[in-house]
Amino acid sequence: MNTLLLVIALLLAAAMLGAAWVSIRVHRVATAMLAAGLVSLFASVMFLLLAAPDVAMTEAAIGSGLTTFLFFFVLGRVRGGRDD
């Protein structure tokens, strides 16, 4: 069972690194914000695997949910809804 958790944790870490790389390298702001939210979502799953459900729930709610929504809300207000 520990080997399975290790493999899942390594896959999540690789997915987090991939999403972070995407958020840095893309040219569209909306795609970068989605990738950053995905990093936070993967981090919440990682916290759940590490037996910290309270931290996982907080990260999912605030980190990936509210922050991503706030980024898109501000982007819509600043640019008038257009994404160059």
Image (spheres, grey):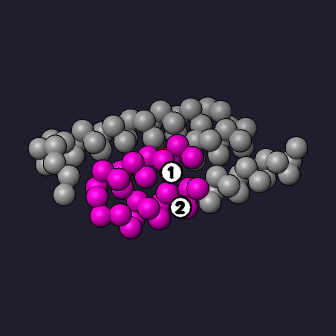
Q: Is residue 55 left or right of residue 24?
A: right
Given residues 49 and 27, the one toward you in this image is 27
Residue most toward the left?
A: 80
Residue at horizontal 50%, vertical 51%?
Answer: 39
Given the image, on which type of amino acid does mark 1 rest?
Val
Q: Is residue 75 left or right of residue 70?
A: left
Location of mark 2 (residue)? 18
The disc placed on residue 39 is: 1
Residue 32 horizontal/vertical position (percent): 36, 55
Magenta-colored span: 15-42
Whether residue 78 appears in this view of the structure is no
Whether residue 15 appears in this view of the structure is yes
Residue at horizontal 48%, vertical 47%?
Answer: 38
Q: CA distance from mark 1 to mark 2?
A: 9 Å
Residue 63 horizontal/vertical position (percent): 45, 41
Residue most toward the right?
A: 1
Given the image, on which type of amino acid does mark 2 rest?
Gly
The disc placed on residue 5 is: none
Q: Is residue 32 magenta?
A: yes
Quarter of the image for residue 47 reads: top right
Q: Is residue 18 magenta?
A: yes
Q: Is residue 1 positioned above or below 20 on the image?
A: above
Disc 1 + disc 2, Cβ < 8 Å? no
Near mark 2 (Cα within 10 A), the count class, few <14, some 14-19 or many ≥20, is some
Q: Main secondary structure of the magenta part?
A: helix
| On-image quarter of the N terminus | top right
Residue at horizontal 20%, vertical 52%?
Answer: 83
Front: mark 1 or 2: 2
Q: Is residue 40 left or right of residue 46?
A: left
Residue most toward the bottom?
A: 25
Residue at horizontal 30%, vertical 39%?
Answer: 70
Residue 50 horizontal/vertical position (percent): 72, 43
